[in-house]
Image (cartoon, rainbow, N blue to C red):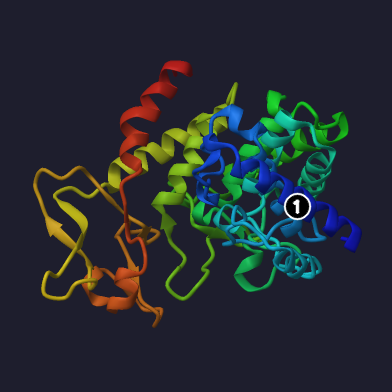
Amino acid sequence: MTQRSIRFINSAIMLCALALAGNAQNARPVSWNEILKQDAAWYGDVEATRIADNVLLYQRNTGGWPKNIDMAAALTESNAAAVAKQKQKIDSNIDNGATYTQLTFLARVYEAKKLERHKESFLKGLDYLLKAQYENGGWPQYFPNAKRYYAHITFNDGAMIGVLKLVRDIAQDKAVYSFVDAARRSQARDALQKGIECILKTQVVVKGKRTVWAAQHDEVTLAPAPARTFEPVALASGESVGVVRFLMSLSKPSQQTIDAVESAIKWFEATKIAGIKWIEKVDSAKPGNAQWVVVHDKTAEPIWARFYEIGTNRGIFIGRDGIVKYNIDEIEEERRNGYRWYVDEPNQLLNKDYPSWLKKWPH
């Protein structure tokens, strides 16, 4: 980005800030984690434009964005200049909502304001995602800096599914993406189909039966793969909920897709854990020293372990030593309290999403 471009964006940010100051309707700032939760009118407001211009500054030359940055936070001129100097970095990724969140947001702002710079940024970002997709249909966590587990096909934290939702909406001519040209829309359709095929090929088969998915899969063999020390080869319940919901969102699903959903639903039914809760317990004698613990409660709704051992369906827990345990109390306090070891999302999948899907696609 040229110094002239930086000055232009900075001026736009300052003008937006002045307008915002006189507009009582926008007194409450919007945080980045709320960026896709606003009503349609908000995306045409000066605050949305200010944040969109921030997003442009953070976009890397690769076309993607880094993760874990509050891109809604106001930038001073010196801050903006410092951000612009980082454009050469190769830290673009799809982890923790990165890149596909920025693109979804930019599309909404462009639909409302029709500022060409936002369209150009969106198309560059879309090109990045299309280029990052493997020939087998999967997406790595990082691209082009795909080293170690960054190269794995990544379902963890909804990464690949987040990308596929965006690609699906573009491929299916959703109105907010009407500005995307025919050539890119065609590429999105191809990417969507390849992504679906990758999902179907990576569903883990145990003793001839389809189960669910791992958090990561090897980018070459498609086998379940590990990531960090405490993220082993395992079936991942939380991530698999997102995968199943995505498959359920498809219009005219193939028989193979229907079979994949049905198999996953059976697995969730078979692996639910009754009679316990995973709660944060506060020690009144030690304020701020909360502990996550398992408590027995016969009235509790079912929960699921985050990770299940492939072949046995036993819940597994791992500390920083990388040794698999079958009891949450056997891993160190730091990991026990610093990771989400149980999930409850499958309840809604089983009790609401799946019955609704069956009404649409009875079989």
Quadrant of the image containing the C terminus: top left
Instruction: Determine which residue is flagged by label 1.
Output: 56
Quadrant of the image containing the N terminus: bottom right
- The amino acid sitting under disc 1 is Leu
Viewer-closest of 177 and 4? 4
Residue at screen point 61% across, 38% down: 165
Q: Is residue 337 left or right of residue 134?
A: left
Viewer-closest of 346 and 15? 15
Quadrant assignment, res 350: top left
Quadrant assignment, res 234: bottom left
Q: Is residue 276 left or right of residue 179?
A: left
Viewer-closest of 123 and 37? 37
What percent of the width, then of the height, locates residue 211?
43, 46
Count the marks: how many? Answer: 1
Q: Is residue 315 left or right of residue 262?
A: left
Vertical position of residue 106 compared to residue 256: above or below: below
Viewer-closest of 284 and 30? 30
> Could you tell me which secondary element the residue under label 1 belongs to?
helix
What percent of the width, then of the height, locates residue 321?
39, 83
What percent of the width, then of the height, locates residue 144?
76, 64
Vertical position of residue 87 compared to residue 176: above or below: below
Residue at screen point 69% across, 44% down: 16
Vertical position of residue 212 compared to residue 306: above or below: above
